[in-house]
Amino acid sequence: MERDIPQLGPRIPAETLERFWTMLAHSQGTNINASKLAANIEVSSVSIARYIDLLVDLLLIRKVQPYTANIKKRLVKSPRIYVRDSGITHALLNIRSYNDLLGHPIVGKSWEGFVIENIMSVLPPRVRAYYYRTAGGAEIDLVLEFGVNEKWAIEIKKGTSFSLGRGFHEACADIQPQKNL
């Protein structure tokens, strides 16, 4: 990354790039706060936006936009970021074994990113991926839009037992998907 990224975009000092990647790994599956990231690595939020766009273009991270079509509720509108390779995420977080991963707070978001990448790898290119979250807490991890008339709502959980929560059902009532999984 230190050698290849500067050839494709802005020159980023190695130390800054390492801190940026580590912060992205810690932020796996969360909403982007460019100002907070910028303050932590002492660059402008405009630079952070450029770094993120570059990494998205290089297919190193995935930016999932919020689903906002025709909803009359207060929605979370900042995109979510996922490091596309869970091995890179785990290496940046110094997770060396499966037991280390299970004991780390990132385990759920790491699993979510892994599942999203696998789902997206088998979908046709025209399918759009979003997430949905209201200010009240109704949430869908992945909304797939297969054109104008078909939406799927997918909830992703890591654990031994699984149940769909009230927030998922409220979110499905809001966006009315044809399938909810």
Image (cartoon, grey):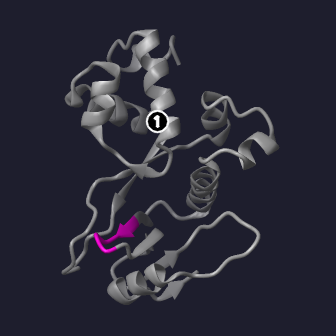
Compared to residue 120, the image places residue 53 above or below, namely: above
**Could you tell me which residue is drawn at 38 percent across and 88 percent down?**
176
Query: Mark 1: which amino acid?
Result: Leu
Q: Position of residue 37 (x, y in %)?
A: 33, 32
Q: Nearer the viewer, residue 59 or 161?
A: 161
Q: Would you say residue 60 is visible in this rendering? A: no
Magenta residue span: 131-136
**Left or right: 35 with respect to 86?**
left
149 is higher (above) or lower (below) than 80 = below
Give the residue at x 41% y 65%.
131
Q: Quadrant of the C terminus?
A: bottom right
State which quadrant residue 42 falls in: top left
The residue labelled by disc 1 is: 24
Point out residue 97 in the picture as x, y percentages from the top left corner.
80, 37
Percent coordinates x, y for residue 156 in the rendering: 59, 67
Asked whether residue 1 is drawn in magenta, I would say no
Res 167 visible:
yes
Query: Is residue 180 rendered to the left or right of residue 90?
Result: left
Q: Circle 1 sits in a helix, a strand or a loop, which is it?
A: helix
Q: Is residue 78 above or below residue 163?
A: above
